[in-house]
Amino acid sequence: MDAGVIRVLVVDDNAEYRRRLAKLLKLQGGLEVVGEAADGREGIQIALAVRPDVILIDFRMAGLDGFSAARTIVRDLPDTKIFILTAYPGALDPTKVRSRGIHGLLIKDQPVAEIVEAIRKTSVA
């Protein structure tokens, strides 16, 4: 695998959104989608198996929500960068999110170019 490729895991319980985002990310140079998960538990399992560079995880999901899953991933995979995806920008305080080891918030309806930019900026650090 190319060392310059950023490996991404997408976790969202909305299958249509998850597939669309993964498809758009696959079209970007330098990114590889290494997995998709439908909930937080599956996201943790896949993350531990494939060890992605970046995880995009939905905040609100049935079962184990993204915030809870992210806490486990931060503990077990400290080098993995995590972004919380949300349709509700005011639902979380970005400062509080970052203080828990999560690298940022991304709004689901923002342009994919902005999501890709956030991934690349964080992965360079």
Image (cartoon, rainbow, N blue to C red):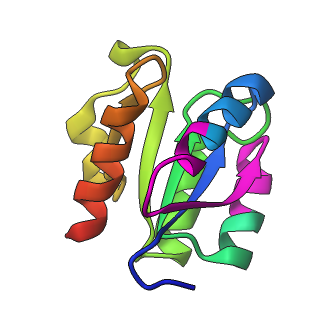
User: Where is 54 relative to 56, above or below?
Assistant: below
Q: Quadrant of the N terminus?
A: bottom right
The correct choice, above or below, for 87 with respect to 80 in the image is above
| Most foreground residue, 66 or 11 | 11
- x 64%, y 43%: residue: 22
Q: Residue at x 76, y 48 (%)?
A: 37
Q: Quadrant of residue 49?
A: bottom right
How many labels were placed on the picture? Answer: 0
Viewer-closest of 39 and 53: 53
Is 104 situated left or right of 52 in this image?
Answer: left
Q: Nearer the viewer, residue 32 or 64?
A: 32
Magenta region, residue range:
24-44
Residue 59 position by quadrant: top right
Residue 78 x %, y %: 42, 75
Q: Looking at the figure, which quarter contains the C terminus?
A: bottom left
Q: Residue at x 45, y 72 (%)?
A: 5
Q: Is residue 45 magenta?
A: no
> Does 42 lie within the magenta span?
yes
Figure check: 39 above or below 100: above
The residue depicted at 79 percent of the width and 41 percent of the height is 38
